[in-house]
Image (cartoon, rainbow, N blue to C red):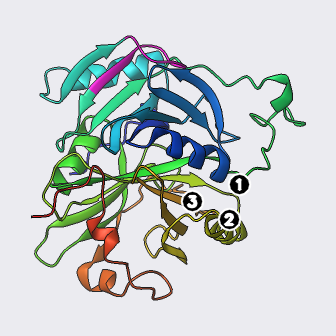
Amino acid sequence: MTPEPIFDLAHLGHLELLTPKPDESLKFFVDVMGMTVSGRQGESVYLRGWDDYERYSLKLTASNTSGMEHMALRARSPQALERRVAALKGSGYDIGWTDGDLGHGPAFRCRDPDGHIVELYYETEWYEAPPELKPALKNQAQRYPARGINVRRLDHLNCLAVDIKANREFFEHYMGLRLTEQIVLNDGTEAAMWMTMSNKSYDFAYSRDHSGTKGRFHHVTYALDSREDILRAADIFLENGVFIETGPHKHAIQQTFFLYVYEPGGNRVEVANAGARLILAPDWKPIVWTEEERKKGQAWGLKTIESFHTHGTPPVPHK
């Protein structure tokens, strides 16, 4: 029986992305993606989309490799955070408390079955725009930057994992999340999952790592307001010499209108328009996609590019 969704967690708050080319990556996120720097600490720069309500949604950290250091999920209340911590303690997945980071308070860390670090927190700093970035409308976090692609907010991320079923069960049992869509192969193997903490169709996805390597990262996605914005983004990437991996096009799963590129550090970045899909049904039944259906490619027939199955970060040495 599927565990009851608990909804102690509100949304994906931020992620820490590692880059071996920190200056080039920062320039990409500021000048091309149109993000705003909202802090610096040590080897890290903190960045935000213009309508992220928290101080930042991306922590960009200089490293000798690429990949994701951690993802962070915000709880709905201090009590909700304590409930999730109580569920995780002694599970074998728990790491323990940290004092927090720039922009947020104490956080409890754990690892999913694949080894990705997941951080849970509640106390956070709401972004206060400086005078030059104050918006005209008070219900908007900051002024529209009119720079590059002008990404609005963090939408979701995608991790790679060796055992999708184990990770799905982890997020259902310990985090109280809901599965909305998944891919199941002919032999019954779960090949991908999309999960949500709210009425959003998904906050993150996991897909099977064909290299058999644990703890790798697939992509981070920032939202734009319309399909036309995605088409314009393709032109802006082209003008800036950014390699476009695939798209613009429409996914069959979740119906997201998408465009994928690589940032200079090697991490895959998606800009997307998620459309109007919301999961309002309390008894939502996960959509299951078969192996044959996925071989048809994306919604309008574009075949899924091979690198989408093979490129992840950190890179795996060729055998």
In the foreground, 152 or 213 = 213
Label located before the other in sequence (3 or 2): 2
Mark 1, mark 3: which one is toward the viewer? 1
Residue that numbered label 3 is attached to: 271
In the foreground, 122 or 233 = 233
Answer yes or no: is residue 256 visible: no
221 to the left or right of 233: left
Residue that numbered label 1 is attached to: 148
205 to the left or right of 189: right
- Circles 2 and 1, Cβ within 8 Å, touching? The answer is yes
Circle 3 packing at 10 Å, graded few (<14), some (14-19), many (20+), is: many
User: Compared to 190, does 132 lie above or below?
Assistant: above
Query: What amino acid does circle 3 point to?
Result: Val
Query: What amino acid does circle 1 point to?
Result: Gly
Residue that numbered label 2 is attached to: 236
Q: Secondary structure at mark 2?
A: helix
Q: Residue furthest right?
A: 136
Asked whether residue 103 is drawn in magenta, I would say yes
In the foreground, 55 or 164 = 55
Q: Secondary structure at mark 3?
A: strand
Query: What amino acid does circle 2 point to?
Result: Ile
Asked whether residue 45 is drawn in magenta, I would say no
Label located before the other in sequence (1 or 3): 1
- Circles 3 and 2, Cβ within 8 Å, touching? The answer is no
